[in-house]
Amino acid sequence: MFYKRTKIAVKQFLTISLLLLFEFMSPLCAAQEAIELIEQADTLRVTERQSSVALLKKASRLALSPYEQDYLNYLTSFHVAMDGDISKAARQIEPLLSRHVSGRLALRLRATLLSLYAGTKEWEKGVILVNELAAIQKNTPRDSDWYTARVGQVFFFLHLELFDDALQLILDARGYPEAISEEPNCRFKTYE
């Protein structure tokens, strides 16, 4: 009798445990799915824009953290800019800046917005972003996003005919002991 009750209690415990496990894992799986969709959309944003947009739409239907929502909004704004409405894209990115003052997304937001400001010839706003980017870059690893932002800063200074400032940014980027990938290195050589 005791054995039978224990066996039933163990089965009930395992059943409840599994139900609770699946209940708690469901939001975790959805959150993981959301960030995976957004990151995949990011990877495809230039080479397969339609696929990227479709992935962003799918991700937008999921529950997103504030960071994921801002990341999604950034990529959506990127597509708006690629479709030619750079003023609208800039207006969409601007509110995101205050929520991201450091890290990868902060760097990418400002680098993209800097390019948009160059396109709309909003030089004063761009100069502020150049300074913000420089501050963020001091505490950010020199990865492809860092170098892409640096190329944008150089390009912006060249538009303003601030050749010495542009050259200083190039020398700083190329003088770092880590190897630079081929694309930014080629761009820096072109600008020199």
Image: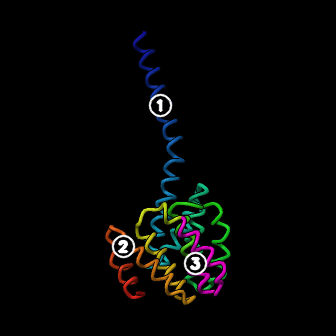
Residue 57 position by quadrant = bottom right
The residue shown at (50%, 59%) is 35
Circle on res. 114? 3
* Front: mark 1 or 3: 3
Q: Residues within 10 Å of mark 2 (few under 14, many from 20)?
A: few
Pointer 3 with pointer 2, Cβ within 8 A: no
Marks 3 and 2, how far apart at CA: 24 Å
Could you tell me which secondary element the residue under label 1 belongs to?
helix
* Residue identifier under label 1: 15
Q: Position of residue 108 (x, y in %)?
A: 52, 69
Marks 2 and 1, how far apart at CA: 61 Å
Q: Counting residues from the N terminus, which is met first, the one under dot 1 or under dot 3? A: 1
Q: Quadrant where the N terminus lies?
A: top left
Q: Residues within 10 Å of mark 1 (few under 14, many from 20)?
A: few
Q: Counting residues from the N terminus, which is met first, the one under dot 2 or under dot 1? A: 1
Marks 1 and 3, how far apart at CA: 55 Å
Residue 97 position by quadrant = bottom right
Could you tell me which secondary element the residue under label 3 belongs to?
helix
Which is nearer the eye, 94 or 22?
94
Q: Position of residue 151 (x, y in %)?
A: 46, 79
